[in-house]
Image: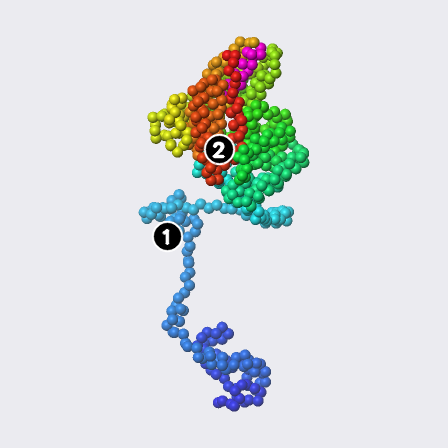
């Protein structure tokens, strides 16, 4: 059967072939259970040259390999053929309740609950609610893609990351979240603090503002590290900031109207100048420098810039404008009191600038008596010629007492200047202003004290409450061993009420001292009676002494704040009371204030010697200047 030739050729008579049953399924040969491989090779003697090529593609070794593969187990093959793919003939739809869909049973679809579930005693979970979102038209999308300009990706540089980290560290150290500030409340809130606004709002900062942020952060870092290279970097940055600020002020030219209301405008040079000056006023001192910073000088420069150029720093950005207006209202008024000169904004654009009166301010002012409890609107102050007393419903001590104080001090100083008698017009004008200044404490301040004691004060602390005195606080030790003048001390329900309480009494003493100064000048220079202005000088003096004693009653509570800023504020308040008692020739009260100042100064020294202890509040130095205004000459009444 086998010829000598093993491969088909044109010269062989017979061609070898193998008849086999495949042991595995090969894709190319799975049509029949048996297959003659030689059927694909052509017949012998017909001269098909394809036979030789096919034999080369499928050599005999391949056929031997196919025959050597073991046969698949017959039982496993039978089970595999018997297993069929599962066909789902029914599927729960969205019209079925949730319970039937989970159980994979048919649902009757009755709403609001499936009756089939209720009959089965199963709680029906109800039906799913679907929200359909419509896709935009493809043509509209194509139009947007063709017309919109490609937006470049925002690149965050390493310098910006470092600046953000340093600013975050500065805010965390200076404004800890777990401590409630006993200092000036409004500048320390997140909404009105310029540092918080810079960290929270994308202002698209100009180079001047970025330089100011770098300076304040480097100064803070230098105070913490005490390293020479950091101190040098902070000093160099401060020099660059001063040079850049000077160039910006000299080159500034207002060129556009004020957008108080309207679309948001880009940051202006005036805004960056304003923000840079405010940040410079709170920049910490470098190690080795004097603790007396130049904050007051910077604030005076800010006021001069605003007086000349008006409110051009406002750009329509709500958060930035609010913070800047708050800084101007608070620091500008305090600086005006310290300078005893009112700030006159002659630019007509100032009439469009609203006074920012935040909701938290209103709540605090109501609790401390600044506002009447039922005061919902603010109206104009009554005319000086009116004989009617101010309405308690319309009480607003920020508007009626604190804001007019710089103008009153300036008028009193101008009235006291020179020699010789005054004109009748000057006497009438000053008399009208003095009566108005006297009516505010008489009809508004005194009722506010009663409201504050009822709303924001807790039980008073007396010397018998030994547990209320901390021996680690210098003022508490002095108050306990010297209970002769102050026998009861104020206690507040919240720390945020203490500062408005003392600030109100501070402004009241300044007002009374100005009234006494004008009365004495009229008696000495014009030979008038002590009541020539329609105000009793002795009554004003008694009221001022009573309010000064109330300031001393705050010492126990305010001294519990273990910060250098709060201690310096307290020293300024006690100094104001001491100056008043010295002018009134009250020896016992004067000696008590001197002893209390010694204790407060000792605590300030202790806090200043602590590590990383410094004060950056720009108003501490200004308050110390304000305390010198609580003096008068006790003659003529």
Left or right, 239 with reference to 610: right
Q: Residue drawn 59% across and 40% down?
A: 238
Out of 354 and 180, give the one closest to the viewer: 180
On the image, numbered disc 2 is attached to which residue?
A: 565
The x and y percentages for residue 508 are 49, 21
| Quarter of the view holding residue 385 | top right
Q: Helix, strand, or loop for circle 2?
A: helix
Asked if one can make out residue 201 in the rendered structure from this viewpoint, the answer is no
Judge left or right: residue 381 versus residue 68: right
Tell me how many marks there are.
2
In magenta segment, residue 524: yes
Q: Is residue 322 above or below residue 15?
A: above
Q: In the rendering, which numbered label is found on residue 157?
A: none
Write the residue at 58% across / 31% down: 297
Image x and y of residue 417, in percent: 60, 17
**What's the magenta region?**
508-526
Q: Earlier in the sequence, mark 2 or mark 1?
A: 1
Between 109 and 210, which is closer to the camera in this rendering? 210
Secondary element at image label 1: helix
What residue appears at the point 61 percent right and 24 percent down from the top-left corner?
344
Badge 1 is on which residue?
Answer: 103
User: Crowding near pointer 1: few (<14 within 10 Å), some, many (20+)?
Assistant: few
Question: Which image quarter: residue 594?
Answer: top left
Q: Residue at x 40, y 74 (%)?
A: 72
- Residue 178 can be seen in this image: yes
Q: Residues within 10 Å of mark 2 (few under 14, many from 20)?
A: many
Tell me the chief SS of the magenta region. helix
Instruction: Give how far apart the Cα atoms at labels 2 and 1 are.
Output: 70 Å
Horizontal and vertical percent position of residue 188 = 50, 34
């Amino acid at each position: 059967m086998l010829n000598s030739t093993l491969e088909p050729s044109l010269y062989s008579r017979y061609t070898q072939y193998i008849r086999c049953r495949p042991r595995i399924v090969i894709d190319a040969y799975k049509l029949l259970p048996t297959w003659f491989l030689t059927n694909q090779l052509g017949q012998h003697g017909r001269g098909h040259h394809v036979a030789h090529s096919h034999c080369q593609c499928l050599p005999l070794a391949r056929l031997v390999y196919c025959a050597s593969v073991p046969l698949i187990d017959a039982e496993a093959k039978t089970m595999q053929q018997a297993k069929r793919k599962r066909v789902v003939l029914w599927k729960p739809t969205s019209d079925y309740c949730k319970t039937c869909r989970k159980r994979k049973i048919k649902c009757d679809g009755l709403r609001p609950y499936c009756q089939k579930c209720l009959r089965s005693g199963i709680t029906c979970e109800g039906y799913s609610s679907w929200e359909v979102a419509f896709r935009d038209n493809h043509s509209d999308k194509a139009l947007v893609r063709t017309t919109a300009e490609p937006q470049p990706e925002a690149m965050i540089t390493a310098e910006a990351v470092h600046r953000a980290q340093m600013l975050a560290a500065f805010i965390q150290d200076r404004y800890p979240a777990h401590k409630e500030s006993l200092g000036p409340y409004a500048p320390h809130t997140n909404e009105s603090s310029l540092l918080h606004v810079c960290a929270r709002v994308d202002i698209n900062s100009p180079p001047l503002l970025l330089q100011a942020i770098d300076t304040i952060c480097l100064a803070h870092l230098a105070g913490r590290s005490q390293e020479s290279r950091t101190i040098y970097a902070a000093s160099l940055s401060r020099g660059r900031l001063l040079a850049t600020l000077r160039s910006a002020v000299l080159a500034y030219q207002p060129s556009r109207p004020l957008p108080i209301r309207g679309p948001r405008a880009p940051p202006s040079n005036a805004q960056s100048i304003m923000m840079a000056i405010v940040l410079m006023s709170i920049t910490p001192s470098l190690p080795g420098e004097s603790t007396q910073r130049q904050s007051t000088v910077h604030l005076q420069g800010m006021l001069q810039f605003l007086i000349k150029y008006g409110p051009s720093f406002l750009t329509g950005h709500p958060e930035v404008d609010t913070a800047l207006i708050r800084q101007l209202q608070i620091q500008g008024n305090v600086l005006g009191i310290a300078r005893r000169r009112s700030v006159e904004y002659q630019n007509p654009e100032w009439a469009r600038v609203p006074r920012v009166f935040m909701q938290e301010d209103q709540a605090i002012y109501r609790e401390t008596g600044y506002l009447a409890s039922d005061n919902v609107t603010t109206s104009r102050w009554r005319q000086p010629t009116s004989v009617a007393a101010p309405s308690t419903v319309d009480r607003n001590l920020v508007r009626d007492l604190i804001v007019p104080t710089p103008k009153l001090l300036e008028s009193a100083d101008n009235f006291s200047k020179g020699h010789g008698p005054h004109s009748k017009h000057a006497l009438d004008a000053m008399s009208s202003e003095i009566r108005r200044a006297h009516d505010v404490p008489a009809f508004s301040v005194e009722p506010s004290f009663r409201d504050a004691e009822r709303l924001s004060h807790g039980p008073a602390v007396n010397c018998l409450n030994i547990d209320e005195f901390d021996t680690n606080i210098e003022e508490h030790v002095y108050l306990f061993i010297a209970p002769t003048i102050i026998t009861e001390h104020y206690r507040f329900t919240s720390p945020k009420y203490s500062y408005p309480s003392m600030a109100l009494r501070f402004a009241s003493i300044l007002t009374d001292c100005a009234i006494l100064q004008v009365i004495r000048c009229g008696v000495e220079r014009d030979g008038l009676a002590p009541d020539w202005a329609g105000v009793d000088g002795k009554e004003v003096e008694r009221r001022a002494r009573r309010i000064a004693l109330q300031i001393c009653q705050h010492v126990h509570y305010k001294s519990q704040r273990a910060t250098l800023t709060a201690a310096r504020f307290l020293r300024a308040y006690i100094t104001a009371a001491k100056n008043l008692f010295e002018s009134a020739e009250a020896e016992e009260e004067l000696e008590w204030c001197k002893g209390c100042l010694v204790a407060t100064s000792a605590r300030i020294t202790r806090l200043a010697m602590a590590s990383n202890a410094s004060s950056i509040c720009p108003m501490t130095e200004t308050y110390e200047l304000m305390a010198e205004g609580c003096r008068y000459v006790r003659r003529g009444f």
